[in-house]
Amino acid sequence: EAQLVESGGGVVQPGGSLRLSCAASGFTFSSDDMHWVRQSAGKSLEWVSSIDSSGDTYYPDSVKGRFTISRKNAKSSLHLQMNSLSPDDTAVYYCARGSPKAAAGTGAFDLWGQGTVVTVSS
Amino acid sequence: DIQVMQSPSSLSASVGDTVTITCQTSQDINRYINWYQQKPGKAPRLVIYDASTLETGAPSRFRGSGSGTLFTFTISSLQPEDIATYHCQHYGYLPYTFGQGTKLEIK
C-alpha cells in the first residue's frame, strides 16, 4: 500500500529553521513528482513547493528564498528545509504525490501524508 | 496568480439531497481543476481531477463539471459519510492555488 509519513515538525522561534522529512513507501518514489502543501488552523490549503522526478524545484513567492525542497531517491525520502520562519508559517505541513494521470502535469495530489505540525512562536 | 473563488463557504443539507459547490477562477484554466474531500483531522483526499474525472475509489455520486473559469462539484444523494470540507484547486499554471473550502454539514 502506498504511504507517506511526515516528521520533523515542532515549535520554533521566529527567525529559526526547521527541516521536515517525508518517508515514502509502496510506490516507485523516484518516478513521481512530489509536493509540500500546508494548512493553517481553520484555513484553506496552500501549495508550498514541488520537485519533479528530474530534481527541478518550484516555489510560490511566499516561501521562495526561504524554503528548499529536496529528495533522496535512494531512500525514498522528501525534505523541506525551512529558514527565516515567521508566525505566518505556522501550519500543518503535508507531503503529497503528484498524480501522473492528470492531463497537465502532476498538480493533482493523489496521495497525502498525515501531516506534521509546525508552530512558529516566541 | 490565478485566484480561485469558491462558494458557498458552508452548506447544510439533508441525507438524500443533491448539493452543488462552485469554483470560479480569475483566468481561463481549461479543465485543470481538482476537487478534494477533507474530513476533520485528516489529510485531503483527491476525488475529482481534470474537472470531471472521478478518482479511483471515489463514490460515483460525486460529479464534477465545467471548463474555462466556472466549475461545479455535485454530490447526488448525500450520505452521512460525505460530511467534510471540500476544496477546489487549479493546477494548470504555477502557483497552484486552492479555493477557500466549503464545509458541508448534515441537517
Image (spheres, coloured by chain):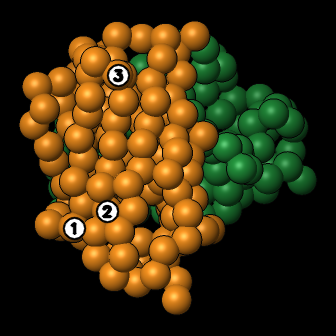
Q: Bin the neighbour count of mark 2 within 10 Å (Cα to Cα): few under 14, some 14-19, many 20 and up.
A: some
Q: Chain of mark 1?
A: A
Give the SS element for disc 1.
loop
Q: Bin the neighbour count of mark 3 within 10 Å (Cα to Cα): few under 14, some 14-19, many 20 and up.
A: few
State the image coordinates of residue A38 (x, y, percent, origin top left): 45, 56
Q: What is the CA distance from the residue labelled 1 to the residue labelled 2?
A: 6 Å
State the image coordinates of residue A20 (x, y, percent, origin top left): 42, 50
Q: Nearer the viewer, residue A39 or B74?
A: A39
Tell me, yes or no, if residue B87 can be seen here.
Answer: no
Instruction: Look at label 2 and name its amino acid.
Output: Met
Q: What is the CA distance from the residue labelled 1 to the residue labelled 3?
A: 24 Å
Give the SS element for disc 2.
strand
Q: Residue at x 34, y 10 (%)?
A: A28
Q: Nearer the viewer, residue A112 or B88?
A: A112
Which numbered dot is residue A75?
Answer: 3
* The quarter of the displayed image where residue B3 is located: bottom left
Q: What is the CA distance from the residue labelled 2 to the residue labelled 3?
A: 21 Å
Q: Is residue B99 left or right of residue A72?
A: right
What chain is the orange one?
Answer: A
Q: Residue at x 28, y 18 (%)?
A: A74
Q: Quadrant of the N terminus of chain A?
A: top right
Up-down: is A22 above or below A74?
Answer: below
Q: Is residue B4 left or right of residue A44?
A: left
Instruction: State which mark lies toward you, 2 or 3.
Output: 3
What chain is the green one?
Answer: B
Which numbered dot is residue A82?
Answer: 2
> Same subunit under labels 1 and 3?
yes
